[in-house]
Image (cartoon, helix red, strand yellow):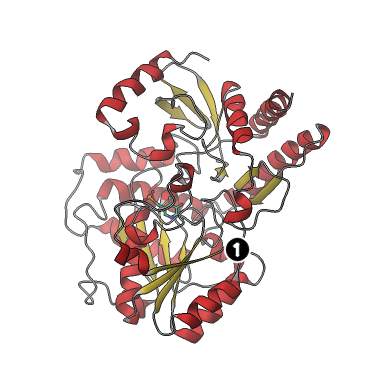
Amino acid sequence: MKNTKSAELFLKAKEVIPGGVNSPVRAFRAVGGNPLFIKKAKGAYLYDEDDNQFIELINSWGPMILGHANEVIEKAVRDALSNSLSFGAPSRKEVEIAELIVDMVPSVEMVRMVNSGTEATMSAIRVARGYTGKEKIIKFEGCYHGHGDSFLIAAGSGAVTMGVPDSPGVPQGVANDTLTAPYNDINAVKLLVEKNKNKIAAIIIEPVAGNMGCVLPKPGFLEGLREICDQENIVLIFDEVMSGFRLSLSGAQGVLGVKPDMTTMGKIIGGGMPVGAYGGKKEIMQKVSPAGPVYQAGTLSGNPIAMSAGLAILTYLKSNPSVYSQLNNQTDYLIHGMRKANNLLGLDYTFNHIGSMFTMFFTNIGVHDFETAKKSDLAKFAEYFQAMLSRGIYMAPSQFESLFISTAITTELADEIIHAHTESMKQIHN
Ligand SMILES: *Cc1c(COP(=O)(O)O)cnc(C)c1O
């Protein structure tokens, strides 16, 4: 694979951008080699600066659920462009997207738009603290909620990939207010709540975890959290930045049937533009400024171009709900093919999968929390990643990520991926 232009750009980038990238996992540190600099993308394909073509299995870490450069979204953005890029004043589309979100996600009665998933989660816990008058939060090991100080404790995604689960620069005082429990361990949560009686403002969780690889909640686990939160006046926050509009029109909560008090959203909600949102019960959201005393603001929040893209993708999904069965079937087909290839080679690796999210862990034990995810053979993963890349398949450069299918992945492309997988597995187990 020709790589000269990307390699050159990376050398230059490292001089002027920390690590050469604007978000750590992009740097390929966990898999070796230099990252590819992407020039353009269309449908299921990415093209790098050296004109290599790749089939997409990461889709900008989730947002591009309809594939790249989708006509519907591009048109909405083009139509909005000539009316100015920003007003800093209320506009019609902000009302329309809020109405649409409230309609699509039943637990959300009011919503505030922000510019990233990180902003959404940071704001949500501030509101939960303001609402309950309590300060501590509980998060789960391996869950990632953006890079806010409170969340960089046992965080997944880039934080674990980089081997710095607890970041310098997070004040001890802030860290002290974040309690952590193993994912899927309801007894650990009960103990924490007992030990910190009347001190817990919120429990925040990825209802389907995607940032330690894809990890599903065990039956009864989310229900158990719901019960504890109801008993103890704790705000239950589902961080659906990844799973929202990915697993169903109403996210993971729509599939799993547990209602949170607050929900954070991002990724798909902007169709590729920098958008996030947090919302929930009216009683809680009325605490947000200027309706209430909890301050949260944004110069570019509700930006007209970003709202146009968001409205276009959400409207499309809502009027074409069969997108989800199509995505799910395609993902089932792909995973079936990959598993079958593994079986034929006598390999037994764990697949975790729901809807169009999946991870193959390089271990044969069941993966249900961060500890078990970490049993994966990371060196083998790195070899697999490179083997797939050299065959034109672009995956997340870390074992601790979920992969995504977009609607642009046809059965023919799924077959190509399965073929590349089979050859890659043969190569690395030789
Ligand atoms: C990606 C992600 C975030 C952070 O969103 P950004 O837009 O990257 O700030 C937060 N929570 C979850 C679950 C995510 O997957």
Question: Circle 1 sits on which residue?
Answer: 255
- Amino acid type of disc 1? Val
Q: Residue at x 33, y 57 (%)?
A: 148
- Position of residue 179 relative to residue 391, above or below, is below
Residue in the image at 61% along x and 50% along y: 373
- Quick check: 186 above or below 345? below
Q: Nearer the viewer, residue 30 or 225?
A: 30
Res. 355 in view: no
Q: Quadrant of the C terminus?
A: top right
Q: Left of 105 or right of it: where is 208?
A: right
Quadrant of residue 27 within the rendered picture: top left
* x then y, percent, for residue 163: 46, 44
Asked whether the viewer can see residue 194, the reply is yes
Label 1: state its secondary structure. helix
184 left or right of 63? right
State the residue lying farthest toward the left.
Answer: 88
